[in-house]
Amino acid sequence: MPRIYVWSPFVRVTHLLIALSIFGALFSGFFKPLFSLHLFFGSLVFVLLIARILYGFFGTTYERFSHFDFSWRDLRYYFLHLFRDKRSYIGHNPAASWVMIFIILGGVAVTLTGLLLLGAMYERGPLDFLGKILYFWGDFLKKAHQLIALAILIASLIHIIGTLIEHFYHRTRIIDSMVHGYKPYEGKDLHPSILQSLFGIGAILLSLTIAFYAANDRSYREFLALHDLYPVEFRRECSSCHTLYPPQWLPSSSWKIIMQDLKGHFGKDAKEYVKHPEIIQTYLLAHSSEHHPSYFPHAITRSNLQSQKYRLSRISFIRELHAKIPPKLFEHPAIKTRSNCQACHLHFDEGILQPEEIRIPDISFREALQIYLR
């Protein structure tokens, strides 16, 4: 049977890496401790998609967008003849053309919303400056990110089903063609030029480099950490009997209630430890949640406007974040109480609440799955 060389190594490798990255990003997105892995896959797919878009304009003939079949008439014909005799295609068939362009554009959109979300909600990444500007858009960006990801998942599953039909029902051996690059068709082989090959190698290496950097970057710790900015009195006296609670995690109204009743400080007499209450209260009120323009403090302020809760664990926004965690977990000997934030949030006292900094102590993998998939 005659065959023709259609898919270059760059397209075949990026096709595989993008597919693995999409499903890897979707899976790791459900588990906060795997956030670094989520950033790895997201960064990888973003750079690869940008490279694929560029390659779509100067790659080999069958890999260019100009060779994609976007005709509605051809698409209708394709589906009407899906399970009977139909045309054969050298490059992408009409359905694959539409699905691929949707996945490419959707992939760029989901990674861009991810970058915006990373900056607006977590104040990190290349758009970290947005944390002080778009923090109130955090919930909208999160929903947009999730909906686009769901759309890509559905499109990917449709693409997989269509590929299986092509390969096994119509016996086009389309899966084999993505391994060796050849399709059973008469014509002239179109191998990539040296420039196209160098572009492909460079794009893949660049994408892996950026992905590894994104997954392992911890520079936000230096940028977000507040520990060294705390007044000596606050740091020394408030940490003498419990974990430090950064001022931005409660509104000023809550701090006033706490500081006005030090003798009955959550069942203890804190006056024995707090020798400079005026200095500490002034600092807390000046740096409370309403004076801290970022996503989490803003959400805390907004959800506490009516209730005036002075326990962080009782604020509705915080309770919603922990709603999927079984109540019994807070009774674990390593945690003991909901107010022991430091038990799971490793750098809570420094004001850092990053997903990959969460470590739930001494639980089995099965218990972890029950927590995150509940």
Image (cartoon, rainbow, N blue to C red):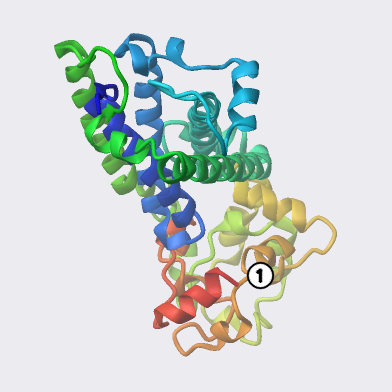
Instruction: Write down the residue under mark 1.
Output: 323
Is 58 left, or right, of 72 in this rendering? Answer: left
Rendering coords of residue 131 (x, y %): 55, 37
Rendering coords of residue 279 (x, y %): 56, 58
| Quarter occupied by the C terminus | bottom right
> Compared with residue 57, is residue 140 higher up or lower down, i.e. above or below?
below
- Could you say which quadrant of the image residue 7 lies in? top left
> What number of labels is visible?
1
Which kind of residue does numbered mark 1 sit on? Ala
> Compared with residue 29, is residue 326 higher up or lower down, i.e. above or below?
below
Q: Tell me if residue 75 can be seen.
A: yes
Q: Residue at x 42, y 82 (%)?
A: 363
Rendering coords of residue 373 (x, y %): 56, 69
Q: Tell me if residue 44 can be seen.
A: no
Q: Which residue occupies the foreground of this view, 284 or 320?
A: 320
Q: Residue at x 39, y 83 (%)?
A: 362
Q: Residue at x 45, y 75 (%)?
A: 343
Under circle 1, the secondary element is loop
- Could you say which quadrant of the image residue 172 lies in? top left
Q: Residue at x 56, y 82 (%)?
A: 330
Question: Outermost residue toward the right?
Answer: 306
Rendering coords of residue 49 (x, y %): 40, 28
> Compared with residue 251, is residue 220 higher up or lower down, i.e. above or below?
above
Q: Which residue occupies the foreground of this view, 203 or 140?
A: 203
Is 325 left, or right, of 107 in this rendering? Answer: right
